[in-house]
Amino acid sequence: MKITNAYVNITSPGRNFVTLKIETDEGIYGLGDGTLNGRELAVASYLTDHVIPCIIGRDPFQTEDIWQYLYRAPYWRRGPVTMAAIAAVDIALWDIKGKALNTPVYNLLGGKSREGMLVYCHANGKDIEHALEDVAKHQEMGYKAIRVQSGFPGLASTYGVSKKPGRYEPAERGLPSEYEWSTEIYLRHVPELFARVRETFGEELLLLHDCHHRMTPIEAGRLGKELEPFHLFWMEDPTPAELQEGFKIIRQHTTTPIAVGEVFNSIWDAHDLIRNQWIDYLRMTLVHGGGFTHLKKVADFAELYHVRTGFHGATDLSPVTMAAALHFDTAIHNFGIQEHMPHTDETDAVFPHNYSFKDGIMTPGDAPGLGVDLDEALAAKYPYQRAYLPINRKLDGTLTDW
Ligand code: CS2
Ligand code: MG
């Protein structure tokens, strides 16, 4: 089999998605996701101008060799743009393999290790009362694991809280908007939020919380310790992770489990975190982590150190990544949990798919390949629109981590 053609599709059914379609001489095609929130066109150009010309004529079954070719040949390695482009190719090639062999991708990765995946959703409110209402709503929808975020008095806006009631979508069209931040206010209120959630919903509900890289390690240690009575499933992205040894400080102070990695793009972002057992869950997912070929190695390495997966699954990860992630989650032994932020109906219509949600569990379906498609005629009705993630400033105006 040979790759005969490949092209990038950019569509914006509510938010932007970059999809790579790879076609073969046997009429089978594969889809890969290359969406990088707020930097979509950089990946599209990387693919169209630099990658696609090099893969035409190659055998789509050679996923290892093509991965190494795209990673090593350019000399410039790693980085979110490069790794999202490599992931788009890799995901599409595994889709082709599955379709050619007439089997779901999970069968090529080890077969079923479980029947379905525990997923967590995102509940939020402008204050604690509204957050509690949203938790109740998600519990009624069947979720057994809920990440809870809330606004707090003294902060006009914060990460994870929808500006308007309804779905949370962090990217906004136009230029970046500005949010404000105070770690002091935040730390004062988060324990109260989780005390109220436990009091209202009891012990059985699995609870998560996203800190979105906003604390120093010692502040995160304090928060983890104060949240211990509420038994969180995890505390997510407590501190920026370029300095991996920062996590040693957090670990020394708390037994609250730690998840990190939605912005990672290779094993080298997580190597020390894993081998020192400073984290419990790794969030790097297929689109930003170089696809199946790289992440399978990372997950197998993590398994040796009792680190489980907890893949990022926000709305900026397209249905192609969602499908791919569910195949991956089905097959690996050290699966932990999967994030699920449902897409809009418009997005679901552009990307018809076989995966499904029921009673807090998701399954990838049994269609050959990934079981996800792209309706290109419908996609064309939603042209790209520039959008950015917000930026974040402390109350004195200092730019800080979003
Ligand atoms: C978040 C994301 O889902 C999450 O865990 O941290 O909403 C994140 O802000 C976006 O995916 C960024 O693109
Ligand atoms: Mg997060």
Image: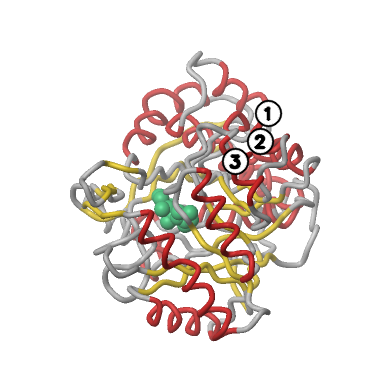
- For image coordinates 52% across by 68% down, the residue present is 121
Residue 336, x across and y down, in percent: 70, 57
Q: CA distance from mark 2 to mark 3?
A: 27 Å
Q: Quadrant of the N terminus?
A: top right
- For image coordinates 26% across by 54% down, the residue present is 180
2 or 3: mark nearer the eye? 3
Q: Which residue is mark 1?
A: 64
Which quarter of the figure has residue 195? bottom right
Residue 91, x across and y down, in percent: 58, 42
Residue 27, x across and y down, in percent: 56, 43
Q: Is 359 placed left or right of 156 in the picture?
A: right
Work out whether 375 lies above or below 19.
Answer: below
Q: Which residue is mark 3?
A: 247
Work out whether 394 lies above or below 3.
Answer: below
Q: Check mark 2 vs ligand 1: CB closer than 8 Å? yes or no.
A: no
Mark 2, Cα crowd under 10 Å, few <14 / some 14-19 / many 20+, is many
Q: Which mark is residue 140?
A: none
Numbered disc 3: secondary structure: helix
Contact, CB < 8 Å: mark 2 with mark 1? yes
Mark 3, Cα crowd under 10 Å, few <14 / some 14-19 / many 20+, is many
- The numbered mark, 2 or 3, whose residue comes first in the sequence reads 3
Mark 1, Cα crowd under 10 Å, few <14 / some 14-19 / many 20+, is few
Work out whether 374 lies above or below 153.
Answer: above
Q: Which residue is mark 2?
A: 293
